[in-house]
Image (cartoon, rainbow, N blue to C red):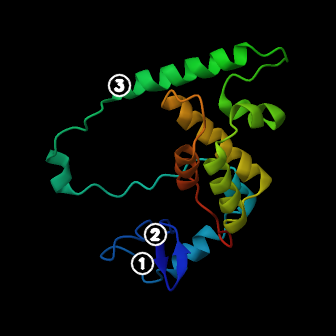
Amino acid sequence: MAWQNGKRVTRCCRCGYLDDPARACSRVPRCAQDYQAKISGPLYDRIDLQIEVPAVAASDLSLPPPAEGSAAIAERVAAARARQRARFAELEAEPRPRSNAEADGRLLEEIAAPDSQGRALLTEAAEKLRLSARGYHRVLKVARTLADLEASAAVRRLHIAEALSYRRFGPGRG
């Protein structure tokens, strides 16, 4: 996320080169604002994870591979999914959720209740970023999944902070 003239500007525009001064169109940053204004706030609110992936420089292509490979990541994801399946298998209600993404209401509050510091952060973020109820609950679901990836029984402040970092806010939103 970039800042221009004291306003937050996301990285996409019609030309696709907002971050590249050599290739960006002549309408930057207005191009990005016009382009992003076409997406409604409620639609932005339904997008849980948005991660900026900058262009890879040619010099970076020759760097050594990352320390954690795809197989190790796949194992962590499979273990997190197994934790979720086990958590929901104990429920009496039908239909049972299969993942954190399907949990809602009282069940979500039960399985994803953050620690006191996490709750304080989420409350502050909800006020400052004007999170909708949907956005608030989506942050909780992502935070619970992040905790599962770490094999953590509790949702902590760190998980809430990371879940919030993956959210982007549409035009006119925090």
Separation of marks 1 and 3 at Cα, in angstroms:
41 Å
Q: Position of residue 93 (x, y in %)?
A: 85, 18
Mark 1 or mark 2: whose residue is earlier in sequence: 2
Residue highlighted by disc 2: 15
Residue sitting nearer the eye, 140 or 38:
140
Name the quarter where the C terminus is drawn: bottom right
Q: Position of residue 29 (x, y in %)?
A: 49, 80
Q: Is residue 29 above or below residue 74?
A: below
The residue sitting at the bottom extreme is 5
Q: Nearer the viewer, mark 1 or mark 3?
A: 3
Q: Are marks 1 and 3 in contact (CB under 8 Å)?
A: no
Q: Are marks 1 and 2 in contact (CB under 8 Å)?
A: yes
- Secondary structure, mark 3, is helix
Q: Residue at x 48, y 76 (%)?
A: 3
In the image, what residue type sits under mark 3? Ala
Q: Nearer the viewer, mark 2 or mark 3?
A: 3
Q: Is residue 58 left or right of residue 13?
A: left
Separation of marks 1 and 2 at Cα, in angstroms:
6 Å
The residue sitting at the front extreme is 116
Residue highlighted by disc 3: 72
Q: Residue at x 52, y 47 (%)?
A: 158
Residue highlighted by disc 1: 25
Q: Position of residue 145 (x, y in %)?
A: 58, 34
Q: Residue at x 14, y 46 (%)?
A: 62
Mark 2 or mark 3: whose residue is earlier in sequence: 2
Residue sitting nearer the eye, 89 or 64:
89
In the image, what residue type sits under mark 2? Cys
